[in-house]
Image (cartoon, helix red, strand yellow):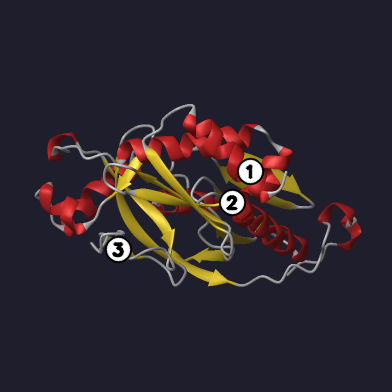
């Protein structure tokens, strides 16, 4: 399947769900733009990042269509009541849009050199990023939004799958609720994981639907983390950063890891080196 075939399949499946949209495909950027017809609000989907995964997993095509459909549904004009609004923080890359298509700035805070914190109203199956106009309609200041989001984020469940590879432990948080990366803001959770680590604690948020924590005990661990970050970053519909963060003394510091071992599965245990 090439990128044009993927684009056609996405639009065909989307048309089975709704017809109130317009679509435009940018060949140079390999970006699909889908907008509502009634208010021209929409989203961009990078198909270049999705085509490889779609080849391996046919269900991923359905995930793309579901994501577009739910996002368009939430972009229809409707009144949102402040007492009913459930707000969560959402992590995005610093290169993410600062404002809506209409030019209204999003409500956001700085996080790291690689990431910023945006805020979103949750609709169970999707969410809507809060801009200054929406915040004003809710009668809320940025400080109010931040406080609500922080409190709600602490209530998000956190569990993980663990995988040990050549002496290094990797933990994966993957609820697919749109807030996996947001869990990096839960300091109590990070401190709990820090206590588990006997090596250097590395944290990664390659895209919004996964949070990776590594207990890197040897040089192979750093190579594996670098490979994982690049792989997940390339596959994510909402990529954030391919860089990992070192966590110590309650601080996140971006770390560039140059993965030298191309296939860590081929490296023997005797080749591990403590760092």
For mark 1, what is the residue? 6
Give the mark nearest the N terminus, 3 or 2. 2
Q: Are marks 3 and 2 in contact (CB under 8 Å)?
A: no
Please state the total of marks drawn on the protein image: 3
Q: Relative to the observer, which residue lies in front, 190 or 81?
A: 81
User: Rounded to the nearest whole Å, what is the CA distance between mark 3 and mark 2?
Assistant: 23 Å
Direction from residue 271 to residue 83 in the image, left or right: left
Residue sitting at x 53%, y 70%: 254
Q: Residues within 10 Å of mark 1 (few under 14, many from 20)?
A: some
Direction from residue 104 to residue 178 in the image, left or right: right
Residue sitting at x 31%, y 38%: 74
Give the mark nearest the N terminus, 2 or 1. 1
227 over 169 or under it: above or below: below
For mark 2, what is the residue? 47
Secondary structure beneath dot 1 equals helix
Q: Position of residue 70 (x, y in %)?
A: 40, 35
Residue 115, numbered label: none
115 over 6 or under it: above or below: below
For mark 3, what is the residue? 99
Secondary structure beneath dot 2 equals helix
């Amino acid at each position: 399947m090439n990128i044009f075939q993927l684009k056609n399949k996405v639009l065909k499946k989307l048309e089975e769900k709704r017809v109130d949209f317009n679509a435009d495909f940018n060949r140079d950027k390999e970006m699909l733009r889908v907008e509502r017809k009634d208010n021209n609000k929409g989203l961009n989907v990078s198909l270049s990042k999705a085509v490889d995964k779609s080849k391996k997993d046919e269900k991923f095509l359905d995930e793309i269509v579901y994501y577009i459909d739910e996002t368009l549904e939430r972009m229809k004009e409707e009144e949102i009541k402040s007492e009913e609004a459930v707000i969560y923080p959402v992590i995005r890359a610093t290169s993410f849009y600062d404002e809506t298509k209409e030019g209204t700035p999003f409500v956001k805070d700085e996080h790291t050199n690689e990431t910023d914190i945006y805020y979103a109203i949750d609709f169970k199956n999707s969410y809507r990023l809060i801009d200054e106009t929406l915040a004003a309609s809710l009668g809320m200041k940025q400080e109010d939004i931040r406080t609500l989001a922080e409190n709600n984020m602490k209530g998000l469940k956190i569990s993980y799958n663990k995988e040990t590879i050549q002496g290094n432990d990797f933990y994966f948080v993957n609820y697919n609720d749109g807030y996996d990366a947001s869990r990096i803001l839960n300091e109590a959770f990070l401190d709990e994981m820090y206590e588990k680590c006997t090596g250097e604690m590395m944290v990664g948020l390659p895209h919004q639907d996964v949070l990776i924590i590594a207990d890197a005990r040897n040089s192979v661990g750093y190579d594996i983390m670098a490979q994982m970050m690049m792989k997940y970053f390339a596959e994510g519909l909402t990529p954030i950063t391919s860089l990992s963060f070192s966590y110590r003394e309650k601080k996140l510091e971006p770390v560039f890891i140059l993965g030298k071992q191309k296939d860590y599965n081929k490296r023997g245990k005797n080749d591990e080196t403590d760092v």
